[in-house]
């Protein structure tokens, strides 16, 4: 089989560099084009010097896209910008995996309320498939436009889906307490990712109004067939990458530890990247990989289920999940090129 | 007034060194004796070299205690060991502030169930006053034995007391999600505080069974006059010191942001170390100080109150609160020697 | 004695906040004015929220300076800006301690070569005293304008002065390998202090051309009476504050470990902030304090002297040394208000 | 070609887990046996839980080694223990790559002086080839026993070899100032790798007497044909992995920046893992990979050459270099299985 031709739109951020890092060793594709409007003409390794000698592609402009016969493009663009691209190239022959938030929500209205931006391409919202392979494998296979899930939502959705699907829990009393590494804030220097504001420090942010709240709720509504209500609080960890989400869930009736674990085992029997852990997982256990590690337990004393869900936000929370979606869209084995082993320590 | 004579029992841990750090500049006391059975004969600064030239006291054995006419001793000993000391010196003239967990719980039975140890001095449990000055100022003034609060309980109790006292919340649906620095695990090298197990990492531990659960519940029962039920989950942060606790609370009826903030303002009007913050506090905002920073907010969408509570676990969570208790017991101004300013960054 | 009236020019950076942190507990002065052109009208604690309830001064403009009868001002301004202030207020009655690099070098020419800026007030260079109390105590006492030393130079100068003064070493073969915390790069977010560029990382920078090279050489020339030649290489540590400098020195003749240590002991006999350490000092041993910790040793095998010199860059390397200079200028005990104890851990 | 059968002796340390991490994706070998005397019977992933589902080999005892027809074993044992194994299996058919220091030095005498241990198998010292492929490729190809280089020596040797080989520098005035991550101290919890002793901290250690001094000198003597003298000072960084070494070198005559860079380019023309960097490299630029990044420059002002040399201590400084040696011994391409891309950030 000829190698598939891949374009990466947006080279300067972490999503771009992670895509290149993963795809460089992928056996069935070739990176044909990487774009950057601000750095075009330079090498990819000028932007990311640690890739000197590894990824020396010359950066080009989006306007040159017609020169390449691309099979698929990844959009590593900020939200609000992705939708421009998708609209402009809606009739192109290449498939699109969008890593921004532009096509993840249920409607133009919800998007505009939570993102405080107008959505210029609601048609894309209709068409887009939410790229969570553990839930929507078959739809992804046939999709032309993937809305790649947000990092926090990936942890919450994978942590909650089995219980909601089985209709075992109160769907309007779910607490999602998340802790994320700093790369979630992007590669641009600002106060929130200034070293001395983060190092040896810890804080909550975005209380009550973080956009991922509604992304999580939208998918969980679909999974459960009911209206869910999520209290979502993100916190900023002094680590580069990784998200750990602690979820507190009220079961409808008393539960049983063994059956609870069995439920998750069955639900994820065919999911190569979900690891059901014997112990509480740590962020470093998945660092550099596409795994989502889950730990579930039931507290008889309080009648509460606790789920701990861990990912690398740049991989299962972004570039890795995107490659997983690409593999599915190309009919490849889901795990191709994703045989990444945790870098720990 | 003659300076009060102070003894510190247990010199090798962080609690010991923090007590010395704080008391060295305290105007009304003198450190008369510091004990260590394993390092006696050495200087305090041999054990903690960063105090070379600052704290050069010679370490002695507990058995020499009668040579000194002490007014008060701090016990910086592990739980299970403190009670031996308290029993042995129960008729001594000095007052005791115990920084271990040995006298914090309500009964011998509860202690033995959660600490998996037999309690050899239940009489002490009866006598001990829980050293939370914001709640028990008057009792502390007259106490001879103080059970200095645990670090996690300090954040949870100060975060919850106003709402429970006012009978505004469901007392059996409280979720306390805490994140602590590594010094909480003590100064002895072990897997849990091995650098490469902690750095760039994050995990939950002690799910469902952490001892501080029952310490929190005991005090909150007393505050509310009802039986509380707490789901407490600690997590380990890659930081040296600091605890941030996120508390999720279901109000009995719909609330109001302004009244909520007013309630806390009134409750802590005379508490010099509780700061009601305008923004979400970060751990470094209180580093090196005796402050407990609180932030409270109400989410109309979900009908939930969220409280964020932050301390330095070694200070307001241990040595600083102990000195605050000492000041009260001596009739000094509560803040004497505690004019510590956050080291940030 | 009436309290001295102090002004701090420049409130938004780390130097400003450290000055306030130290001076707030100083018994003999009061902070009368803090200026900020960009944040005037706001409170100091709006700019540095961790000081809420501690430092609530209202920020004013430099143009209001005549309203206050100041005894002394600290300039916490960038280099290139300080000289404007010094020139403008050269006839004022207040003394000035400038924390920038504008008046530290020997001449307008050297300044302009290494700072790539023209110097608008060379008269100030003539007048300014280099504020290293361990070398220039008497001159500082009578000075009206202090050039407060740079952070790296403080470590190098204190580490080398005894040997150079005694004429024991090759003055043109000195290697100064320094490692600094991130706060040295200032409070503004930029690539160099972006969390994920620093965390779990380490690199050299400014090879061959760092400005502090010539500041060190200038003072060492004065100490030794000869022309020194320094190879200075700074590196960036993933820590907030602290500098450790390793100095490699070729002695003119074979040396002796005991005499070497004796030399330093004698030289620093009256220096309250220089601690001659028994072991190799670590950065955290001086964190939050005005100490400079030194360790010296001789390697017979290679005929080399190694000196390790450690400070907190924001304190002995900036605000603390400035307060030490202020104390001397006011005839106070050098250590007043500087009884800071290391925060470790 | 049938896959080669590999044994790993010693499973519990970082070297063992890194070997497994690398070899798991190696196309031409299979991990046939992993031993641990303390954990035998357990799974490899019980010892390293982050490998759950990835490396589930059952650990066996060394005494079972005859059951497996091994082609090569890696010794991931402490020094002083490796030599027992090598002696015991000196007549076995498998090749040995020893990652300890037991066979790296020139003689029994030197070993015993610097390691303070008697060497029970001096015959092995004679036979062993120092596994630095950039210098000894041909010898490695034919070796049966490889002494895999130490982590610090790898940086120093690769940084210095071109200049020494060309006889351009003073061989007895070399200063090697190294900074290492914490994993260099091993996986066992002790004071040196206790989180709060390392975090936000930095210090020198092993001044004048570190064993790697003599390992570096031994190889450089061989490269230069002269007796070298190295001043080597290691420092401990608050990072997990990585070494950055700054080398100060006195040239015999004035040099030229361009020719200097050309010299290195020629010397390493065929070395796939040496990257000559355009800028000063940082530790994270090589994290998780087998690269050694070098930067060389000449300072006209001081007549000094500065070399900066960076590796991942667990990979190019241990397991990765060992796999590189294995590839050479098996006649495979040197880079097989080592197409690792830096994890940055």
Image: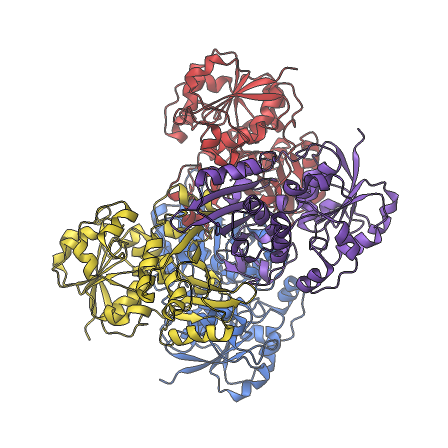
Chain colours: A purple, B yellow, C blue, D red
Query: Residue D180 location, x and y as percent?
Result: 50, 42
Q: Visible in this render: residue B218?
A: yes
* Closer to us: A345 or D277: A345
Query: Residue D227 location, x and y as percent?
Result: 52, 30
Quadrant occupied by the N terminus of chain A: top right
**On the rendered structure, is C28 left or right of A39?**
left
Is D44 above or below relative to C138? Answer: above
Identity of the residue drawn at 14% across and 60% down: B68
Identity of the residue drawn at 67% across and 24% down: D333
Q: Visible in this render: residue B60?
A: no
Is C94 above or below relative to A159? Answer: below
Query: Residue D207 location, x and y as percent?
Result: 43, 42
Query: Residue A147 location, x and y as percent?
Result: 71, 49
Q: Quadrant of residue D283?
A: top right
* Closer to us: C234 or A311: A311
Residue lying at the far right of the rendered structure: A67
**On the rendered structure, is C79 left or right of C144?**
right
Is B195 above or below relative to D87? Answer: below
* Closer to us: C92 or D97: D97
Numbered-mark total: 0
């Amino acid at each position: 089989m000829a190698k598939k031709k891949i374009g990466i739109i947006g080279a300067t951020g972490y999503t771009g560099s992670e895509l290149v890092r993963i795809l460089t060793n992928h056996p069935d594709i070739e990176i044909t084009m990487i774009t950057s409007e601000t750095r075009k003409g330079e090498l990819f390794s000028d932007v990311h010097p640690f890739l000197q000698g590894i990824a020396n592609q010359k950066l080009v402009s989006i306007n040159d896209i017609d020169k390449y016969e691309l099979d698929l493009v990844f959009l590593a663009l900020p939200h609000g910008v992705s939708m421009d691209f998708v609209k402009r190239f809606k009739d192109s022959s290449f498939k699109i995996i969008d890593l921004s938030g532009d096509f993840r929500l249920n409607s133009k209205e919800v998007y505009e309320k939570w993102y405080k931006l107008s959505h210029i391409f609601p048609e894309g919202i209709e068409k887009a498939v939410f790229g969570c392979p553990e839930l929507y494998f078959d739809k992804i296979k046939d999709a032309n436009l993937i809305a790649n899930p947000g990092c926090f939502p990936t942890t919450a959705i994978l942590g909650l889906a089995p219980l909601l699907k089985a209709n075992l829990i109160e769907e309007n009393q779910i607490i999602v307490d998340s802790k994320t590494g700093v790369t979630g804030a992007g590669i641009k220097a600002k106060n929130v990712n200034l070293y001395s504001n983060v190092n040896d420090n810890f804080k909550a942010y975005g209380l009550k109004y973080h956009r991922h709240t509604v992304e999580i709720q939208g998918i969980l509504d679909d999974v459960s067939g009911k209206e869910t209500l999520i209290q979502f609080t993100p916190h900023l960890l002094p680590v580069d990458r990784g998200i750990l989400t602690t979820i507190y869930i009220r079961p409808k009736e008393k539960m049983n530890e063994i059956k609870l674990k069995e439920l998750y085992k069955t639900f994820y029997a065919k999911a190569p990247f979900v690891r059901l852990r014997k112990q509480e997982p740590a962020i470093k256990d998945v660092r550099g990989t596409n795994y989502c590690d889950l730990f579930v337990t039931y507290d008889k004393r309080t009648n509460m289920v606790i789920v701990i869900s861990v990912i690398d936000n740049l991989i299962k929370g972004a570039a890795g999940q995107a490659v997983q979606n690409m593999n599915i869209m190309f009919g490849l084995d889901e795990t191709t090129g994703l045989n990444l082993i945790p870098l720990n320590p």
